[in-house]
Amino acid sequence: MPTTMRRLAACAASAAVALLGLAAPAARAATDAVPTVNLATNPGFEIPTLPLADWGSVPGWSCGAGEAVVSTGQAHDGASALAVTPASGDSTGECAQTVSVLPHTKYTASAWVRGSYVFLGATGTGRDVAPSWTETTGGGWQKLTTTFTTGATATSVRLYLHGWYGQGPFSADDVRVDGPAPAPARATWNAPTTDKVVFFTIDDGWQRTPEAAQFIADHQLPIAAFALPMPSGFEPDYFRRVTAAPGSSIQNHSVSHRDLSTLPLAEQQAEICDARDADARIYGTTTTIFRPPYLTWNADTLQAAANCGINTVVTATADFSWGASNVWHGGPLQAGDVVLMHFTDTLAADLERALAAASAAGLTPASLTAYLH
């Protein structure tokens, strides 16, 4: 049995038991005091480049190719800062990230910057807001601040930092987006329903066999593919093919497949948000469901997921990977069960076995996003 499978099996029981007793987070009462937190991902540029991330990437940030690095010298605070050198006079050297927000809510964005003609702003707020900028910081650090109030339908904004054409390098550090955080994502191991449906989910993406793709196409199976960004980026057309059936989707499985329950909230947020951004860049889709690696998670995972626009953290009720047929609640598959599989050389056979088990229980594979939204 592969190492990851052994670890998965060891974690599964405890994860499942925890989920059985977990209710969805209650909505905040109108009179509750909502704490102000910093919602920016990797705000101080202190998070190391994530394993399995694109080479040269800055965790949490989308920057022009080859323009941005994390500098370990002369930070405003801490050990690191963002250093941007525009690739040409036609580039502003923009770095940006998506920040999840609440509608009708005031937020304050700020950053310490160094350089000439450096801008900080946000788009997608629902209302026009002017950026904060400086003509020059005189060689030192200067704080930029801007405030915006989100519109009625705003659930995310695009935070950006950039220089100006032909003005040379700039640096940034200690970015903040201060305001209330979204409510934590809900956690579940199934999709509670009395409909006679079951859900097939496939993780990782390292082995991509034509037999599995053909089986999915022949049976028009709605698949939720929790593909990691690196293997997904190697062969995106394969994942487009296996999610071509109506009701299929690409969903979030983190960047590096680390056990997120061992990481602080800030690193969990970088893992989930970076995977979200990679999926959006490759497939043009927005992920709304997160599958934690090894099915392990904690309260920080639920908040980090919400901060990345994720509604639901889902584990599984059954595992049909690598020839297994394990139903963790005992007995046959039941309505609403989430079946875990992996992109391996056994996937075609695993799918056939899972489909037979579902049919024997009178269940039909259905779209996970239709039931978890």
Image: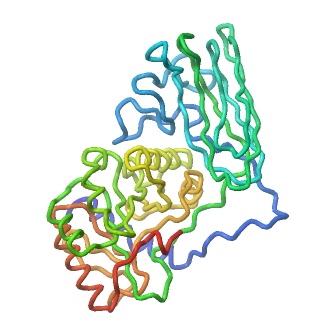
- Where is residue 297? Give x, y as percent: 49, 61
Front in this rendered view, residue 362 or 57: 362
> Taking 312 as reference, is 129 above or below it?
above
Q: How is the image coloured?
A: rainbow
Residue plotted at (63% across, 19% down): 118
- Where is residue 74? Give x, y as percent: 57, 16
- Where is residue 36? Give x, y as percent: 75, 47
Q: Is residue 101 left or right of residue 167?
A: right
Front in this rendered view, residue 127 or 271: 127
Q: Is residue 137 left or right of residue 32?
A: left
Residue plotted at (42% across, 52% down): 254
Q: Quadrant of residue 252?
A: bottom left
Q: Quadrant of residue 354?
A: bottom left
Q: Residue furthest right?
A: 31
- Where is residue 357? Give x, y as percent: 26, 85
Residue plotted at (67% across, 36% down): 176
In which quadrant is the N terminus drawn?
Answer: bottom left
Q: Is residue 357 left or right of residue 181?
A: left
> Taking 119 as reference, is 295 above or below it?
below
| Count of numbered badges drawn on the protein | 0
Residue plotted at (29% across, 49% down): 236
Q: Residue furthest top?
A: 138
